Amino acid sequence: RKEVEQDPGPFNVPEGATVAFNCTYSNSASQSFFWYRQDCRKEPKLLMSVYSSGNEDGRFTAQLNRASQYISLLIRDSKLSDSATYLCVVNVNTGFQKLVFGTGTRLLVSP
Amino acid sequence: NAGVTQTPKFRILKIGQSMTLQCTQDMNHNYMYWYRQDPGMGLKLIYYSVGAGITDKGEVPNGYNVSRSTTEDFPLRLELAAPSQTSVYFCASSPGPSYEQYFGPGTRLTVT
């Protein structure tokens, strides 16, 4: 089983729609979780950290479900500018701590 | 505060040539990383460093070398370039192994 798994998509949604992505992780001891955004041919950029109690940043809400070992990202009122690939990131400890990046979920928002 | 900077932005190499990709960060982060990303694929860790003078291999280290003589700089050396090394290379830094990583803008390398 991969350490971090994401549905590659693409998710095609109209402007204004609400869309959600899930990401599953295999290491039950993981403690740090993040969502990154990567635009085409650009570097990944931190979108938000994911906290145990869930957290919100404007139109974006991140949730953590430790029992089922997944994190989610909800985007409300989608904008054209939200079109990007969203990377799920989880820390694992395989003798040393490291962050593992998922391969990403592609979102396409259309007019 | 420039964050993580990388040079060059683009480079074309001939098979067998060598080059060094430069990476500098001004956030005083101990941890630095080199990734490669092939088209349509995820990030693969090449090498990482936990501080000046300390480096270690990631998932795909073959064909690459690194050094870390200062906290700020983490150059990646390609020896005997091969077409399989055509990729986008990202450098990143973080204050610790479980903290968020900050990425540079990347170097697009083509080996022909």
Image: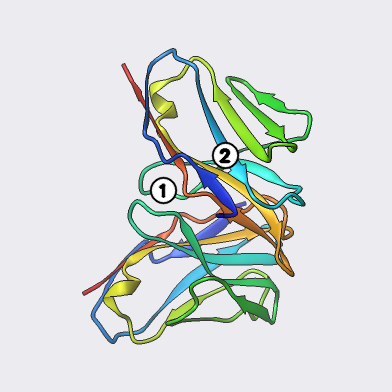
Same chain letter for marks 2 and 1 = yes
Q: Which residue is mark 1?
A: A42
Q: Chain of mark 2?
A: A
The vertical placement of A11 against B55, above or below, is above
Side of B54 relative to B17 (left or right): right
Q: Residues within 10 Å of mark 2 (few under 14, many from 20)?
A: many
In the image, what residue type sits under mark 2?
Cys
Residue at x 36% of width, y 44% of height: A40
Side of B98 relative to B66 (left or right): right
| Quarter of the rendering containing residue B49 | bottom right
Quarter of the image that includes the C terminus of chain B = bottom left
Q: Which residue is mark 2?
A: A23
Q: Secondary structure at mark 2?
A: strand
The answer to whether residue A31 is visible is yes
The answer to whether residue B2 is visible is no
Query: Nearer the N terminus, badge 2 or badge 1?
Result: 2
Give B34 or A19, whichever is nearer the viewer.
Answer: A19
- Tell me how many marks there are: 2
Whole-percent x, y for residue B12 in the image: 26, 71
| Quarter of the rendering containing residue B74 | bottom right
In the image, what residue type sits under mark 1?
Lys
Give the Cα distance between marks 2 and 1.
22 Å
What's the mark number on residue A79? none
Residue at x 42% of width, y 82% of height: B63
